Image (cartoon, rainbow, N blue to C red):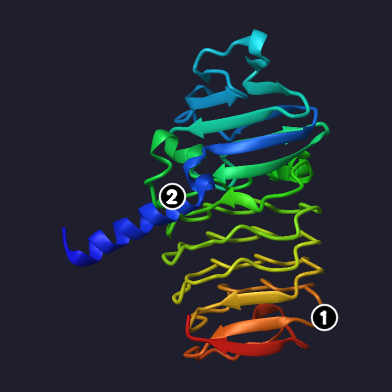
Amino acid sequence: MDLLQRRRELMDRLSAAGDPYLLQPFTINVTSAFTLAIARIGSSTTYPLTALSIKKNNGNWENGVWDSSNGVWLFGGEMFINANTGDTLQIKGNNAWGSSTNDGIIMYCGGGTCTLSGNINSLVCGDNFTTESTIPNYALSNVFSYSGYGFNNAYTDISNLRLPATNLGTSCYYSLFKDNTHITTAPELPATILANNCYQSMFSGCSYLTTAPILPATTLVTGCYYGMFARCTHLSYVKAMFLAIPNVFVTMNWLNGVASTGTFVKNSAATWTTTGANGVPNGWTIQYADS
């Protein structure tokens, strides 16, 4: 093990020790009672719902065999979880969940509210969520927002949700938080290795989002930021460190419909000059940073 690798591992341990949410599985904190439904969409059967593990409050992890007496059961290809105000639901899953943006799992509910916290990697990496740095292709596309089934407006706060992956797969966060009308801040996205369409429409329609997560990647790929913050009408601050826009589809409409004034922080070494919805919005002030 070389010195640089030792240093990186030490920094990772210190980071985790200082942030308990990195060590916590993906958690739904119920603030108003609802029945959460998790459905498998698409034709793939590679990852059935029984690959999910659920822990309710201080109970045991339920894996594969669901206990209706604990308010968790499978019916008609969907999983239902009764949750009362004050309950916590933790979820882990094994491996990836889809082979396209129309194939995977979705969450929805018919009412109620909650906050989200913990490490989102547990949804796809199971017990390895604290050490896994890669999110597979399509793994989390549409999970919270598919076709407006309702969960996208159930969660009111995601400030304690962590997205620590540094290596992203194709469309892995596609439309993840799309059309949420409650969140004002977003969790950081530390990824520096991007894949096609990885962030496409991720926060599209999050109309009360005011500040974008810092985007540290210096190299972009096709569609990675396509429509990422479109229709975020209150968004007024973006810091993005990319050096160039390799083709028109990379940032197409990524800041379409944001606030009329704001601040955009660019990499001081950036060579791109695109303005408008595909670059720096008209009317925004540009600042520069080295990192």
Tell me if 128 is positioned left or right of 160 in this view: left
Q: Which mark is residue 17?
A: 2
Q: Amino acid at mark 1?
A: Ser
Q: To which quarter of the image does residue 262 belong?
A: bottom right
Q: Residue furthest left?
A: 1
Q: Secondary structure at mark 2?
A: helix
Relative to 35, residue 144 above or below: below
Q: To which quarter of the image does residue 193 belong?
A: bottom left
Q: Secondary structure at mark 1?
A: loop
Q: Which mark is residue 260?
A: 1
**Marks 2/1: CA distance?**
40 Å
Instruction: Look at 82% across and 34% down and name the residue there.
Output: 112
Binning the other alpha carbons within 10 Å of mark 1 as few (below 14), some (14 to 19) or many (20 upward) gives few
Q: What is the tally of numbered marks visible in this picture?
A: 2
Q: Residue furthest top?
A: 69
Instruction: Look at 60% across and 76% down and name the residue there.
Output: 239
Instruction: Look at 57% across and 13% down and name the residue there.
Output: 66
Rendered location of residue 201, percent (x, y): 66, 60
Which image quarter is the N terminus in? bottom left
Q: Which mark lies nearer to you, 2 or 1?
A: 2
Instruction: Look at 67% across and 50% down and name the residue there.
Output: 158
Q: Which mark is residue 116?
A: none
Q: To which quarter of the image does residue 38 belong?
A: top right
Q: Amino acid at mark 2?
A: Ala
Rendered location of residue 130, percent (x, y): 41, 44
Rendered location of residue 275, percent (x, y): 67, 87
